[in-house]
Image (cartoon, helix red, strand yellow):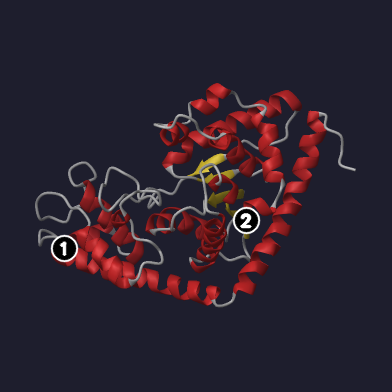
Amino acid sequence: MRVFSGIQPTGSLHLGNDLGAIRQFTDLQSRAECLFCVVDLHALTVPQDPAALRAATLQVAALYLACGIDPRQAVVFVQSHVAAHAELAWLLGCLATTGELGRMTQFKEKSRGHESVSLGLFAYPALMAADILLYRSTAVPVGDDQRQHLELTRDIAQRFNARFGETFPVPDAFIGKVGARVMSLQDPAEKMSKSAADPASRVELLDPPAAVRAKIRRAVTDSGREVRHDREAKPAVSNLLEIFALVSGEPVAALEGRYGDGGYGRFKADLAEAVVAHLEPIQGRYRDLQAAPDHLEAVLADGAVRAGALADPTMRDVRARLGLLPRP
């Protein structure tokens, strides 16, 4: 199994990224061939400050390592360091239709209310398809909100194979059963998001303990006093219970038994301390990486070489099948 996944360097990584995505990455790296990428080209679909983008790219890469991704087991790299991503995106974009791209939910949401949007925002799914197919990936850890893009990737792979001969495996989604969708602390109907306007809706991985405690204390709850997991009747408390279970390793049922109908005060206080304890080693490793920038740069340089070595045969095959002349 070959796995590809990436995170954009926009906004600050939060607890949902760690528990819903990076935890899957660290689990997969020991039993699959994994490529984990900072997808900086995707960030350019909306305006970015260049200095801030550079800093955010390095921050995401450092947090990958701080959260447990091991560059000795997985390939860790920056998307723009492998030029084949952009080349394949153009080639695959020539197979995608405007109807398919226009139906993408994220495009509709991000373009709503704007008189004009960039071609990059519209063609974003072709670049995502290129990210995955470039490495002939067979599995992609995605959240529920990315299923539509993965389905388009599968369609493009099948279309290419039908027209030009078997070239790409058709990748499957890999979605963990637990922690795949960590919800907002302020609205349990919405996924915890880097782009949400209210910073109180998420615990960021680099939040200091005081900020973590304040955000958990202000997290919305449901009516009544019972700490019970019921996504329909008590969605807010259920979300907090799932977070507690993920950061502490205790089963949800054990937490329900401990807090019962004793109200939310002690439950939220203990949850806050569990989250602080979970983040402490991550933040410590991140500070160590910040103090040794040469190490991080070396990891990314090595990752780019390893990723490029996997991408080159794919591009030679794709170019030949499309009738493009070989590179001189």
Q: Which residue is mark 2?
A: 78
Q: Residue at x 52, y 63 (%)?
A: 59
Residue 132 is situated, as x and y percent measured from the top left of the image, at: 62, 43
Is any atom of residue 270 visible in this view? yes
Disc 2 to disc 1, how far (Cα)? 44 Å
Residue 275 sits in quarter: bottom left
Residue 304 is situated, as x and y percent measured from the top left of the image, at: 69, 58
Q: Is residue 240 left or right of residue 318?
A: left
For marks 2 and 1, the one nearer the N-term is: 2
Q: Residue at x 66, y 37 (%)?
A: 89
* Mark in front: 2 vs 1: 2
Residue 1 is situated, as x and y percent measured from the top left of the image, at: 62, 49
Q: Nearer the viewer, residue 134 or 256?
A: 134
- What is the crowding at mark 1: few (fewer than 14 residues within 10 Å), some, or many (at least 20)? some
Q: Residue at x 35, y 46 (%)?
A: 191
Q: Amino acid at mark 1?
A: Tyr
Residue 297 sits in quarter: bottom right
Q: Is residue 179 above or below residue 101?
A: below
Q: Which residue is mark 1?
A: 259
Q: Amino acid at mark 2?
A: Val
